[in-house]
C-alpha cells in the first residue's frame, strides 16, 4: 500500500499582500473587533499554561473574555517553558551593533533554512521588542549592566548580541511573569483554572472547534467543556524519542487528537537536536539535561585529533586537540546554529574521536575563558549550569571539561496554522511550539521564548477576535450529540488501555519506540532506515495494544494510565514523522537526509522540489494520510546555501 | 547498590496511610533518585501491584513539581538539590531510605507521595504580581534598575514553588515562599505602586490557606533547593508592618 497520497495544495489566505513590514499592521486593522460588552459572553478554552498558553489566557482574560485554562501539572507555573535556560531574542539594538527588525527577520528565515513563511517571521521580529517591554513591566528580573540597563549576549546563528537573559533561568522568569498575570486573572474570577487536567479529545460542532474532553487526573472523571473557540498551547512532541530534554509529562496528545479530528499536521519530521546536552549514562536514563547554548559563548568545543585517544583531557596537549567548530566554521566558530553543531559532533564521534565512557561525547572546555576572565566571572555567568552539571555527572567543570552530546530538544513541526494562527478547523487556534509556523526546519536559540510570548501576548489576542466577531455561534452544551460522542470515545479508549492487561510496561514500549526514532529519524535519516523504522513502529504498536500492562483503574490518580494514553498517540505520530522524513528527499535544517549532502557534508536543499510546507491530513486508522503542499515564496530573503563558514 | 526503601503508601485523602517496605537491588550510583523509583514502579506494575504515585516533571530541578521527604530531609541529604537531581551516589550500599510526602496541613495528601499545593497558587493570585496588562508597558529602558537590586530580585525570583520550605518548617509555614515573591517585586521599581497592598493580600491568603506562622525556626532556607535566604522573611515583616501601620488600604498620601 502507498504510504501517502497527495491532495489539493494549501494556501495561507490570511496574510495580507504588500510590503512585508506592513502586513501585520494591515492585518491588525482589517481584523474584526469584539466590543467589550460582548467579550464577557464569550468563552475561550486554552490548553497548556506555558509561555504561549499562559500569556494568551492572561491576555484574553484582561480583554474581558471568559477563559477556561487547563494543564496536566499541579500548577500552571510548572509548564516546561520553565526549563528554558539561555534567553530571549529581541531586535532592540541596544548594543548598537547593527541589529534591526529586518536583521532578526533575516537571521530567522536563514536560520530556518528557508522553510518558514516570511510574513510570520517578520511579524515575530516586529513584536519581539514589545515582549521585552511587557516582561520588564511585569517585574521579570532580567540581567542588567551596572548602569541599570538591560544586558544582552550572543546566541547561535547571529553575529549581534540580541539575547536578553535572566542568568541561566530565562524561561523560568518569563514563565513566572506570565503565570503571575494569569493568577491575577484567576483571582479576579476571569479565568477558570483547571490544573491536573488532561485534554483527551477535541469536540467539533458543525465543523467548528467548540470544546474539549478532559480527564481530571486526580479523580479520573471525564468531562466535556464547551466554548466559542479552542486554543491549543500544548507544546512540542520531542518525547516521541523517549529520551529528550522535555519534561517527562510533555506529550502530543492534545495536538494529535485534534489532528485525528481533521487538523493538518505540518512538517512533523522537523525536530531540533540540541548540541549541548549531558550524555546518556546508562539504561536507567529517564531524560536528558540540556546545558544552555549560552555556554558556547565562552566554552570551546573539541575532541582529540586522533581516534581512540583515551588520555584524560588535561593530558592532551593543545596541538593534539581538534577545535573542530572553529576549524570548519571560522566566522561563527563555536556559535554555529544548533543543527550544524549537532551534526558536527555526530561526525567526529562517528570517526571514533568521541570522548567519555560511551565515546558518544565531545568536550566543552572553559579553561581558556577561566584563564581570560577569571573563575569568578565564569561563576557569575554560568554558576547554576556548572552546579547542575556537577550534580548529575559528579565531575567539576571548573577543573575538567564538560562532556556533551546532542539530544532531542524541540520540534519545529506542529499543527498547521494560517497567519492568524488558526488551524484549518475554524475556531481551533494553535500557538507556541504546538504550531509549525515560525522556525522553518531549524529554530535559532532564544527564539522559542520569543515565539511563545509573541503568539500569546500579541498575535492570538488580535486574531482570535476576528474569528469570534464573525459569530454569534450557536449555543451548545455538553449534551450535544457531537460532545457526547467525543466523550464516549475517550471513555472507550481508557477502558481499552486498562483491559489489555499484558506483560510489558508502558515505559518499556516507549523506550523501544524512542530507540527506533533516534536510530532512524534522528540526526541523520536515510530512505532505507526510514522504511525500516515504519515497519518496526507498526509492529511495535500492534504489540503495544496486545501486551501493555496498565495497573489500577480509571477512577483514580493513575500515572501509568496517563502514560499509556500518551504513548499510544506517540506511536501514531512516530509513523507520520517517518513518512514525512521519507517523502522530503532533501536535507534542510534539522532534517538531514544522508542521500542529500554537499561534497563537504552540509545539508543540500532542493528548493525546486521542496520549498513547501508539508501539511498532512489524517484519513482513517490504517489508511494513508493525504499530503497538502503550501508553497513558500521568498520575496525578501533569497534562499542560498546556508553558510556559517 | 542494594537498598531497602520504606515508602509512605496512602490510597487517597481518606485513607490513613502507612509505611511499606520494598527492597530494591542493582541500583546504579549514576541513577537519579527518581529513576530509582521508576525501577521500583516498573517492577510493581509487572507484579500487578499499584505503583508508587509521586509528582515529577522536568527532572532538571526547575519546575518544582517533585518533592519528597527523604530520611526526614526535604529533597534529601544534598543541599541545594531537588529530589529529581539527587543521584544515588549520595547513598551507600545496604542503606534503608525512608520516603514520605510533604507533611503540612496546607498541603493535603492526594495519593502516596503526591500532595495538593494549590495553596501556593492562591497566595500568588492574592497579589504576587505587578498589574501590567498586555500592551500597557513602557519602553524597557525607560526605568533603569540598579544592578544590585536586579540581582537581589533575581535571587528571590529563583524560587521554584516546590514547597520544601513548608515541609521543613515545624509550623508548616509558607513564609519563605511568600517572602521570596514579595522581595523580588519590592526590589524593583515596577513593583512599588502595589508594594503594600501586595504584602497584605499575600500574607492574608497565606494565613487563610492554613499555613502556620513563622517563628524564625530557620529550617526553611537550608531545605530550599534554591537557597532563598531567610532575611527575605525579615523584608516581608518590615513591609507588612509598614503596610498595616499605614492602614490596610495604604492610605493615599501617607
Image (cartoon, grey):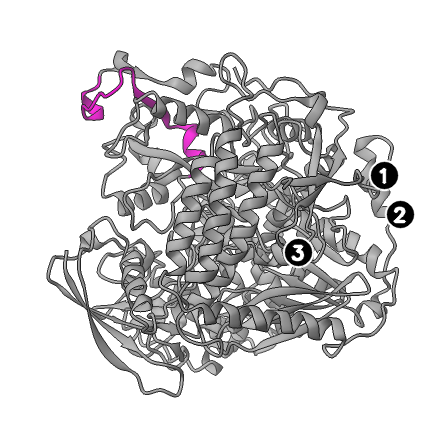
Residue on which the image places disc 2: A30
Residue interval drawn in magenta: A292-316
Do the residues bearing badges 3 and 1 touch, measured as CB atoms within 8 Å?
Answer: no
Q: Nearer the viewer, residue A103 or A507?
A: A507
Q: Quadrant of residue B83?
A: bottom left
Spatial CA span between label 2 and label 3: 32 Å
> In this orientation, does residue A467 appear?
yes
Disc 2 crowd rating (10 Å Cα; few below 14, some 14-19, many 20+) is: few
Q: Can you give x and y, in whole percent of width and height, for residue A508 in the image?
A: 37, 55
Q: Can you give x and y, in whole percent of width and height, for residue B161 in the image?
A: 43, 64
Residue on which the image places disc 3: A260
Quadrant location of the N terminus of chain B in the rendered image: bottom left
Q: Quadrant of residue A206?
A: bottom right
Q: Say which element carries label 1.
A: loop
Q: Who's the residue at 54% across and 49% down the image? A: A237
Q: Say which element carries label 3.
A: helix
> In this orientation, does residue A84 appear?
no
Q: Quadrant of residue A629?
A: top right
Q: Who's the residue at 29% across and 15% down the image? A: A305
Question: Which label sits in the foreground, 3 or 1?
Answer: 3
Residue A114 is marked as none
Question: Which label sits in the foreground, 1 or 2?
Answer: 1
Q: Say which element carries label 2.
A: helix
Q: Who's the residue at 38% across and 68% down the image? A: B163
Residue A16 is marked as 1
Q: Chain of mark 2?
A: A
Question: Which label sits in the foreground, 2 or 3?
Answer: 3
Spatial CA span between label 3 and label 1: 30 Å
Do the residues bearing badges 2 and 3 touch, measured as CB atoms within 8 Å?
Answer: no
Q: Chain of mark 3?
A: A
Amino acid at each position: 500500500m502507498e504510504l501517502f497520497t497527495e491532495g489539493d495544495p494549501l494556501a495561507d489566505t490570511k496574510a495580507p499582500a504588500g510590503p512585508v513590514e506592513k502586513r501585520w499592521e494591515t492585518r491588525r486593522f482589517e481584523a474584526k473587533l469584539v466590543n467589550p460588552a460582548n467579550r464577557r459572553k464569550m468563552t475561550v478554552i486554552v490548553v497548556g499554561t506555558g509561555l504561549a498558553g499562559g500569556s494568551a489566557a492572561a491576555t484574553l482574560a484582561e480583554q474581558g473574555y471568559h477563559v477556561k485554562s487547563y494543564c496536566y501539572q499541579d500548577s500552571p507555573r510548572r509548564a516546561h517553558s520553565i526549563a528554558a535556560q539561555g534567553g530571549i531574542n529581541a531586535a532592540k539594538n541596544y548594543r548598537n551593533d547593527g541589529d534591526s527588525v529586518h536583521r532578526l527577520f533575516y537571521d530567522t528565515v536563514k536560520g530556518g533554512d528557508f522553510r518558514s513563511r516570511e510574513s510570520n517571521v517578520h511579524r515575530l521580529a516586529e513584536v519581539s521588542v514589545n515582549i521585552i517591554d511587557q516582561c520588564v513591566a511585569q517585574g521579570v528580573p532580567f540581567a542588567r549592566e551596572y548602569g541599570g540597563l538591560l544586558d544582552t549576549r550572543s546566541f547561535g546563528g547571529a553575529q549581534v548580541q540580541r539575547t536578553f537573559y535572566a542568568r541561566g533561568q530565562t524561561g523560568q522568569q518569563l514563565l513566572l511573569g506570565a503565570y503571575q498575570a494569569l493568577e491575577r486573572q484567576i483571582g479576579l474570577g476571569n479565568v477558570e483554572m483547571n490544573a491536573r487536567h488532561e485534554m483527551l479529545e477535541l469536540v467539533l460542532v458543525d465543523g467548528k472547534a467548540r470544546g474539549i474532553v478532559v480527564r481530571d487526573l486526580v479523580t479520573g472523571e471525564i468531562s466535556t467543556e464547551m466554548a466559542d473557540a479552542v486554543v491549543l498551547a500544548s507544546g512540542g512532541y520531542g518525547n516521541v524519542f523517549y529520551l529528550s530534554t522535555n519534561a517527562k509529562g510533555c506529550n502530543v496528545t492534545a495536538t494529535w487528537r485534534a489532528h485525528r479530528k481533521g487538523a493538518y499536521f505540518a512538517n512533523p519530521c522537523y525536530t531540533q537536536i540540541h548540541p549541548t546536552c549531558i550524555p546518556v549514562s546508562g539504561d536507567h536514563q529517564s531524560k536528558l539535561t540540556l546545558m544552555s547554548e549560552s555556554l558556547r559563548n565562552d566554552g570551546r568545543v573539541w575532541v582529540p585529533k586522533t581516534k581512540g585517544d583515551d588520555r584524560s583531557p588535561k593530558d592532551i596537549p593543545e596541538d593534539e586537540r581538534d577545535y573542530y567548530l572553529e576549524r570548519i566554521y571560522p566566522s561563527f566558530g563555536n556559535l554555529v546554529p544548533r543543527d550544524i553543531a549537532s551534526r558536527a559532533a555526530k561526525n567526529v564521534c562517528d570517526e571514533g574521536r568521541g570522548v567519555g565512557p560511551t565515546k558518544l561525547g565531545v568536550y566543552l572546555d572553559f579553561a581558556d575563558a577561566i584563564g581570560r576572565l577569571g573563575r569568578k566571572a565564569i561563576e557569575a555567568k554560568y554558576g547554576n549550569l556548572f552546579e547542575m552539571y556537577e550534580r548529575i555527572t559528579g565531575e567539576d567543570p571548573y577543573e575538567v571539561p564538560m562532556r556533551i552530546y546532542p539530544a532531542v530538544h524541540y520540534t519545529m513541526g506542529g499543527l498547521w496554522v494560517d497567519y492568524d494562527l488558526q488551524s484549518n478547523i475554524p475556531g481551533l487556534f494553535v500557538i507556541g511550539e504546538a504550531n509549525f509556523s515560525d522556525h522553518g526546519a531549524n529554530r535559532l536559540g532564544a527564539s522559542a521564548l520569543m515565539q511563545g510570548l509573541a503568539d500569546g501576548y500579541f498575535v492570538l489576542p488580535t486574531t482570535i477576535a476576528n474569528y469570534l466577531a464573525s459569530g454569534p455561534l450557536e449555543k451548545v452544551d455538553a449534551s450535544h450529540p457531537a460532545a457526547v460522542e467525543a466523550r464516549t470515545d475517550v471513555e472507550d479508549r481508557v477502558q481499552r488501555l486498562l483491559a489489555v492487561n499484558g506483560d510489558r510496561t508502558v515505559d518499556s514500549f516507549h523506550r523501544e519506540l524512542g530507540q527506533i526514532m533516534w536510530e532512524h529519524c534522528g540526526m541523520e535519516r536515510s530512505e532505507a532506515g526510514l522504511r525500516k523504522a515504519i515497519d518496526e513502529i507498526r509492529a511495535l504498536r500492534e504489540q503495544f495494544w496486545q501486551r501493555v500492562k496498565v495497573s489500577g483503574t480509571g477512577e483514580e490518580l493513575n500515572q501509568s494510565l496517563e502514560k499509556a494514553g500518551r504513548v499510544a498517540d506517540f506511536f501514531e505520530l512516530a509513523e507520520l514523522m517517518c513518512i514525512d522524513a521519507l517523502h522530503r528527499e532533501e536535507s534542510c535544517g534539522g532534517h538531514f537526509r544522508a542521500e542529500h549532502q554537499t561534497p563537504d557534508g552540509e545539508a543540500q536543499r532542493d528548493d525546486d522540489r521542496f520549498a513547501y510546507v508539508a501539511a498532512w491530513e489524517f484519513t482513517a486508522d490504517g489508511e494513508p494520510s493525504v499530503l497538502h503542499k503550501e508553497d513558500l515564496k521568498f520575496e525578501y530573503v533569497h534562499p542560498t546555501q546556508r553558510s556559517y563558514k | 547498590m542494594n537498598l531497602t526503601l520504606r515508602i509512605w503508601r496512602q490510597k487517597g485523602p481518606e485513607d490513613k496511610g502507612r509505611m511499606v517496605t520494598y527492597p530494591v537491588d542493582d541500583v546504579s550510583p549514576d541513577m537519579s533518585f527518581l529513576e530509582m523509583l521508576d525501577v521500583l514502579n516498573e517492577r510493581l506494575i509487572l507484579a500487578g501491584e499499584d505503583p508508587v504515585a509521586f509528582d515529577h516533571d522536568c527532572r532538571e530541578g526547575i519546575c518544582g513539581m517533585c518533592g519528597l521527604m527523604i530520611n526526614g530531609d526535604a529533597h534529601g541529604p544534598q543541599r541545594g538539590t531537588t529530589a529529581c537531581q539527587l543521584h544515588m551516589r549520595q547513598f551507600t550500599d545496604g542503606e534503608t531510605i525512608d520516603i514520605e510526602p510533604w507533611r503540612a496541613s496546607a498541603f493535603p495528601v492526594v495519593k502516596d507521595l503526591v500532595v495538593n499545593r494549590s495553596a501556593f497558587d492562591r497566595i500568588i493570585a492574592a497579589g504576587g504580581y505587578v498589574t501590567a496588562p498586555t500592551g500597557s508597558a513602557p519602553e524597557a529602558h525607560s526605568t533603569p534598575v540598579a544592578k544590585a537590586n536586579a540581582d537581589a530580585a533575581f535571587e528571590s525570583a529563583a524560587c521554584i514553588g516546590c514547597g520544601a520550605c513548608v515541609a521543613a518548617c515545624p509550623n508548616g509555614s509558607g513564609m519563605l515562599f511568600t517572602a521570596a515573591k514579595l522581595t523580588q517585586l519590592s526590589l524593583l521599581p515596577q513593583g512599588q505602586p502595589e508594594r503594600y497592598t501586595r504584602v497584605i493580600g499575600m500574607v492574608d491568603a497565606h494565613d487563610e490557606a492554613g499555613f502556620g506562622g513563622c517563628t524564625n525556626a530557620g529550617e526553611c532556607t537550608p531545605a530550599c533547593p534554591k537557597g532563598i535566604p531567610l532575611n527575605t522573611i525579615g523584608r516581608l515583616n518590615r513591609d507588612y508592618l509598614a503596610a498595616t501601620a499605614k492602614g490596610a488600604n495604604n492610605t493615599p498620601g501617607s
